[in-house]
């Protein structure tokens, strides 16, 4: 089975072009994503035919679970179809069907080279049921944008105030004043991911606002652990920061693997722009 390895700001993926929906893809993701006995990646991307858009994408985490959304992954998929001549010459936009809806992507060229990809990531969601998150009775429910909660939890003796937002997948954002490198993510991350308030687990972002145009972020991704970048997580951080008026409409999210530009004015869709590159191609013994 042929595959291509790609990365977007250090978030790496194995992409397989297929029309086979019956295969045990979760089991294959476990094997292929393993970094010692497999290819190694933060997820397995499937490029599938679509009846609603130009292409369809599914993404499986290294633990075999299927993710609803993946910002870096969808840019990597766009890079693949661009590099392999799967779009019309001169076209600068493609549409991709995902579990959470059709997403539009803009291909930014310079001197006939693809330098970045802008992905429409959909509108952020704050409803408790849609995140999903179970909030204690008696507390204000997450229903409107202006009721974004600073929800207190204690994890391993550390007090956190989490901000809940869904970008098609659940995120819990924590802001702190000290550098994110100082945060004990390897011990706190898996605990936050599996808090009882998250019935489908959650991605956890630790963020520090540098100024009104820059935020540094580390991410613990459910099913993957700490990654060098998380596109939907960067969106969640930018949204939460904007709601608290920490940042302007355009924000550079500085991740371990690089920087993503996030655009959100407080309503409508979040736009994310960043790079994506193919690393190598190969064959998986099938």
Image: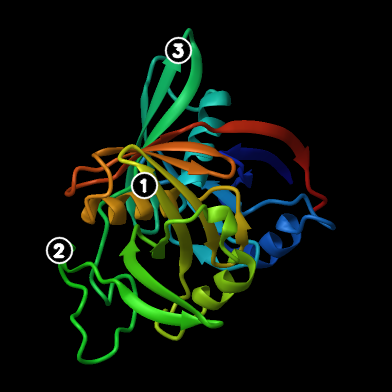
Find residue 55 and report its horizontal and vertical position in percent. Answer: 43, 41
Quarter of the figure with residue 149: bottom left
Element carrying mark 3: strand
Secondary element under disc 2, as helix, strand or loop, is helix
Give the distance between the C-alpha atoms of the residues marked 1 and 2, in whole angstroms: 37 Å
Mark 2 neighbour density, 10 Å: few (under 14) some (14–19) many (20 or more): few
Q: What residue did someone put label 2 on?
A: 146
Label 3, residues with CA under 10 Å away: few <14, some 14-19, many ≥20: few
**Which residue bears the numbered disc 1?**
51
Tell me which corner region of the image, top left, top right, bottom left or bottom right, holds residue 197: bottom left
Q: Nearer the viewer, residue 33 or 188?
A: 188
Query: Which sits in the foreground, 50 or 227?
Result: 227
Numbered tag placed on residue 110 in the rendering: 3
Is residue 264 visible in this depiction of the protein? Answer: yes
Please name the residue shown 50% across and 75% down the image: 192
Q: Along the line of sight, which residue is nearer the eye, 116 or 188?
A: 188
In the displayed structure image, the side of residue 1 where residue 130 appears, left or right: left
Q: CA distance from mark 3 to mark 1?
A: 31 Å
Residue at the farthest front position: 178
Residue shown at the point (63%, 72%) measured from the top left: 187
Q: Choose the circle earlier in sequence order: 3 or 1.
A: 1
| Mark drawn on residue 74 | none
Image: 52 above or below 109: below
Q: Nearer the viewer, residue 101 or 156?
A: 156
Where in the figure is residue 42, as x and y percent of width and height?
63, 53
Q: Going 57% across and 72% down the picture, which residue do you hit?
A: 188
> Closer to the observer: label 1 or label 2?
2
The residue at the point 70 percent across, 61 percent down is 28
């Amino acid at each position: 089975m042929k595959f291509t390895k790609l990365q977007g700001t250090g978030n790496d993926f194995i992409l397989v072009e297929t029309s086979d929906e019956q295969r045990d893809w979760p089991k294959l993701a476990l094997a292929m994503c393993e970094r010692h006995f497999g290819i190694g990646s933060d997820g397995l991307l499937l490029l599938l035919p679509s009846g609603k858009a130009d292409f369809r994408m599914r993404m499986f985490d290294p633990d075999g679970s299927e993710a609803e959304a993946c910002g870096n992954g969808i840019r990597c998929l766009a890079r693949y179809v661009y590099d392999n001549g799967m779009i019309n010459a001169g076209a600068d936009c493609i549409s991709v069907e995902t579990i959470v809806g059709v997403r539009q992507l803009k291909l930014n060229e310079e001197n006939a080279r693809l330098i970045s990809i802008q992905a429409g990531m959909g509108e952020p969601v704050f409803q408790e049921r849609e995140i999903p998150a179970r909030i204690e009775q008696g507390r204000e429910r997450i229903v409107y944008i202006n009721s974004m909660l600073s929800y207190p939890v204690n994890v391993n003796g550390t007090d956190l105030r989490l901000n809940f937002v869904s970008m098609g997948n659940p995120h819990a954002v924590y802001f702190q004043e000290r550098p994110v490198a100082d945060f004990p993510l390897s011990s706190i991350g898996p605990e936050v991911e599996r808090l009882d308030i998250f019935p489908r687990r959650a991605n956890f972002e630790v963020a520090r606002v540098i100024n009104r145009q820059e935020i540094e972020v580390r991410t613990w991704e459910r099913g993957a652990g700490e990654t060098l970048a998380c596109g939907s997580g960067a969106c969640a951080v930018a949204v939460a920061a904007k709601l608290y008026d920490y940042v302007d409409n355009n924000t550079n999210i500085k991740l371990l693997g690089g920087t993503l530009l996030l655009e959100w004015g407080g309503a409508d869709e979040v736009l994310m722009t960043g790079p994506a590159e193919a690393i190598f191609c190969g064959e998986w013994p099938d």
